[in-house]
């Protein structure tokens, strides 16, 4: 009996144990490992199959792992240790779950045991059968709920569907299970579509999985689902839960007691024995990609899981990722893997806010160059804010940078507040007069004078949300200014209370980062302004334009959501580059034109979705060591025939953020026109890297990132 175990020094994914009875695959067990007893998952011995690299997105049949559970320490039967305990109180994880984990481990180049055990609730690792018995019993008591929504008194009255919603739902109902892109403008009522699609599955006794990109967005969606389906049990899965809650919620899903599971990316691995539908809200959001350990894309895995379980997947977005957009482009222009469902109109025909590009060259021409140096907002924009305040409407000023100022500098000698441990500036936070590094956390009180020349005149350069809030308060006397960003929402419940204050109309002008731009349904907002969007225009990250476009359109979508104000709702963008094609597309609110132009650029540059990438990252005490390891890795890849297979290896380079917490970082990009050759190479290459790192170029850490978000 093979048992998948968490990665243990020098031991791979799975070990062989003796079991008196044949255990079903997916059965949770406890087995001795060294001096400890640890949890594992019974697995089939499945002889290594040749790599059949699929992609979460590929239409091809689910593939098998590249290195399935190869037992490292298979001994003679006499040497095998017996399984210590079979957690019989729990039904085994089903075949769909096991396949998903197997696929993810293979695709993202992690060991099966590591992946299996990191996606299970941590608390589960420590419980034994007796404890589990007790908890379950408790669960069984609380879960006595009827399951037919219609029979509950006081069932919520449903809104009449819009024409677009109706059309989409009809198409969904008529379609065989497939992956659908629900491309709906902000305020088109995508959530209502999710609710109705869920209702249809719940009525059949199936479970529904809803993924959201951020914890912040779970409470409001949870509330809407809970309100709509009072007779069904809904559980959430995200990192904000206590370990005990997470276990309880996970068990409820696993035992089929919870019909609705709503969560962040980790929830894609929920055990759902009666899965009927997967919803991925804001599918374009980069938060769906895990950035450490097994660097999986929950969106891509959701698509894979849906296909494998033969259930519908709904990917919702106003600004789909280019990968998804291409996949949803019908032949002959695209592969037509996904069905495209469009909701181009807002509920109530409110119309989208008009986008105004405020040309800063002209502003300076009219008012002189001092005006933009001393004030964050152009006089025209301030006037527009004042108008809103006077009318009792709300505005949102988006500045995607927290803190008071991104850097302090000395007017005497030019000293800047660098972080001694990172290749980054330390941000000035005025609340506690600290200089804080947002990368390593190193924090110090602001010095009284320049640490180099002693000049007391040290000044903030640039502006973050904290400073913007202060300046707006000066410039808009009498207006109630609020601010929401990662700094104001650190304590539990503070985001909810701040959002509630905005909804209650206690704030006139809200300053905030992208955190506010997503999802929230503010009813009194009629003006959204982006004041420093230009900084993202010239980023070296090839996805930066896509991200910026999505963020701005999303932010614009916070305005005019109430049809009563829609006509006078506006999005203002203060920019030095009003003719930039991105802003022009935004002004036309033309996602399709923007996507087409971006895809054309990506095609020429052979970037995703027209190529497949993997990034090998290395961290070491010196840049030399990191690069040395990568060079050795490159040689190993060449020896494995990378070039012949069509996999291009780019030269190792220092990472964009080269040093963090005194650790040097470097990376190397691999690119291939298709997935299979890249996956085959990775499967053969990754084990070699383990060996390579025992040699002279030892690094502290290395990791392969398949389908990296940024390169
Ligand atoms: P999206 O997610 O597409 O931005 P929402 O799902 O948040 O849009 O819907 C926008 C608003 O319209 C919400 O307040 C929602 O309650 C409301 N709404 C959605 N569908 C309908 C409908 N059919 N009739 C009336 N109001 C609706
Ligand atoms: Zn100085
Ligand atoms: Zn630092």
Image (spheres, rainbow, N blue to C red):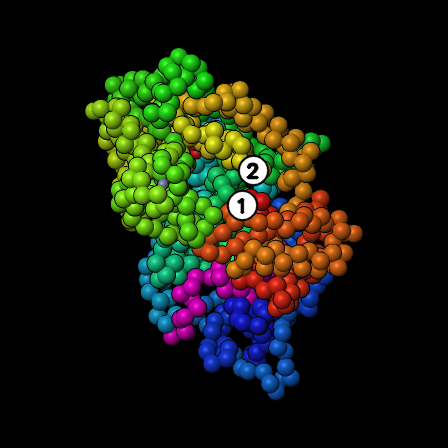
Indicate whether 59 appears above or below 68: above
Query: Nearest the camera: 330 or 287?
Result: 287
Q: Is residue 106 magenta?
A: yes
Indicate whether 49 appears above or below 567: below
Q: Residue at x 49, y 51 (%)?
A: 659
Describe residue 224's horizontal placement relative to residue 63 as left or right: left
Q: Quadrant of the C terminus?
A: top right
Say the numbered circle drawn on residue 656: 1
User: Could you say where residue 633 lies in the image, as x and y percent from the top left?
Assistant: 66, 58
**Mark 1 / mark 2, whichever is N-terminal:** 2
Say the numbered circle drawn on residue 540: 2
Going by the picture, which residue comes out furthest to the front? 453
Indicate whether 70 appears above or below 550: below
The CA distance from mark 1 to mark 2 is: 9 Å
Query: Nearest the camera: 659 or 286?
Result: 659
How many neighbours does mark 2 have within 10 angstroms: few (below 14), some (14-19), or many (20 or more)?
A: few
Residue 517 seen in the current view:
yes
| Circle 1 SS class | strand
Q: Residue at x 29, y 29 (%)?
A: 471
Going by the picture, which residue comes out furthest to the left? 478
Q: Residue at x 34, y 58 (%)?
A: 242
User: Could you say where residue 187 lies in the image, as x and y percent from the top left?
Assistant: 42, 29
> In the image, is the residue at mark 1 within 8 Å of ligand 3 by its beta carbon?
no
Quadrant in the rendering for residue 520: top left
Q: Main secondary structure of the magenta part?
A: helix
Say the numbered circle drawn on residue 571: none
Q: Is residue 526 magenta?
A: no
Q: Decide: marks 1, 2 in contact (CB < 8 A)?
A: yes
User: Could you say where residue 253 lies in the image, as x and y percent from the top left?
Assistant: 43, 56
The range drawn in magenta is 101-130
């Amino acid at each position: 009996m093979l048992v998948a175990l968490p990665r243990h020094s020098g031991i791979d994914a799975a070990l062989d144990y003796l079991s008196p009875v044949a255990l079903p695959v997916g059965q949770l067990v406890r087995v001795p490992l060294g001096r400890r007893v640890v949890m594992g998952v019974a697995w089939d011995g499945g002889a290594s199959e040749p790599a059949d690299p699929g992609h979460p997105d590929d239409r091809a049949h689910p593939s098998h792992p590249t290195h399935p559970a190869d037992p490292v320490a298979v001994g003679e039967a006499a040497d095998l240790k017996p399984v210590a305990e079979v957690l019989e109180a729990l039904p085994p994880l089903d075949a769909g779950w096991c396949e998903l984990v197997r696929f993810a481990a293979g695709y993202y180049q992690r060991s099966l045991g590591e992946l299996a055990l990191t996606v299970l609730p941590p608390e589960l690792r420590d419980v034994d059968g007796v404890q589990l018995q007790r908890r379950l019993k408790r669960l069984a008591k609380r879960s006595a709920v009827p399951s037919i929504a219609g029979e509950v008194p006081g069932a919520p009255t449903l809104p009449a569907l819009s024409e677009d919603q109706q059309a989409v739902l009809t198409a969904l109902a008529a379609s065989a299970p497939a992956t659908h892109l629900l491309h709906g403008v902000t305020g088109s009522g995508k959530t209502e579509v999710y609710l109705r699609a869920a209702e249809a599955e719940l009525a059949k006794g199936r479970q529904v999985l809803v993924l959201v990109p951020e914890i912040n967005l779970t409470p409001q969606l949870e509330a809407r689902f809970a309100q709509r389906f009072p007779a069904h049990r809904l559980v959430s899965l995200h990192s904000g839960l206590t370990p005990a809650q997470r276990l309880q919620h996970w068990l409820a899903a696993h035992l089929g007691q919870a019909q609705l599971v709503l969560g962040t990316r980790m929830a894609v691995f929920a055990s759902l024995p009666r899965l009927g539908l997967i919803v991925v809200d804001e599918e374009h959001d980069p938060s769906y990609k895990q950035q450490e350990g097994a660097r999986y894309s929950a969106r891509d895995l959701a698509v894979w899981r849906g296909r494998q379980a033969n259930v519908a997947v709904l990917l919702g977005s106003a600004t789909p990722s280019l990968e998804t957009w291409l996949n949803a482009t019908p032949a002959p222009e695209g592969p037509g893997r996904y069905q495209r469902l469009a909701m181009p109109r807002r509920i109530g025909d409110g119309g989208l806010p008009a986008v105004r590009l405020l040309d800063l060259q002209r502003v300076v021409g009219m008012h002189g160059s001092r005006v933009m140096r001393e004030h964050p907002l152009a006089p025209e924009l301030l006037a527009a804010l004042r108008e809103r305040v006077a009318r009792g409407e709300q505005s949102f000023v988006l500045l995607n940078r927290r803190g008071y100022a991104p850097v302090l500098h000395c007017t005497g000698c030019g000293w800047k507040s660098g972080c001694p441990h990172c290749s980054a500036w330390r941000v000035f936070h005025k609340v506690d007069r600290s200089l804080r590094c947002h990368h390593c956390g190193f924090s110090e009180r602001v010095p009284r004078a320049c640490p180099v020349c002693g000049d007391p005149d040290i000044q903030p350069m640039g502006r973050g949300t904290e400073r913007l809030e202060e300046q707006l308060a000066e410039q808009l006397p009498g207006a109630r200014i609020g601010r929401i960003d990662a700094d104001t929402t650190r304590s539990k419940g503070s985001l909810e209370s701040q959002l509630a204050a905005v909804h209650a109309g206690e704030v006139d002008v809200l300053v905030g980062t992208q955190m506010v731009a997503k999802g929230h349904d503010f009813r009194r907002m009629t003006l959204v302004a982006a004041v420093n969007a230009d900084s993202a225009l010239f980023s070296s990250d090839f996805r930066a334009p896509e991200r910026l476009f999505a963020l701005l359109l999303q932010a614009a979508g916070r305005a005019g959501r109430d049809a009563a104000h829609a006509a006078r709702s506006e999005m203002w963008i203060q920019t030095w580059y009003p003719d930039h094609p991105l802003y022009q597309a935004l002004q036309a609110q033309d996602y399709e034109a923007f996507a087409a132009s971006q895809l054309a650029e990506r095609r020429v540059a052979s970037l995703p979705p027209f190529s497949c990438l993997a990034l090998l990252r290395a961290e070491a005490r010196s840049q030399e060591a990191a690069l040395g390891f990568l060079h050795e890795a490159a040689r190993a890849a060449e020896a494995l025939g990378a070039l012949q297979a069509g996999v291009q290896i780019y030269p190792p380079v220092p990472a964009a953020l080269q040093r963090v917490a005194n650790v040097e970082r470097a990376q190397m990009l691999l690119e291939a026109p298709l997935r299979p050759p890249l996956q085959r190479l990775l499967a053969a290459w990754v084990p070699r890297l383990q060996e390579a790192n025992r040699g002279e170029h030892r690094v502290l850490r290395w990791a392969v990132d398949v389908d990296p978000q940024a390169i």
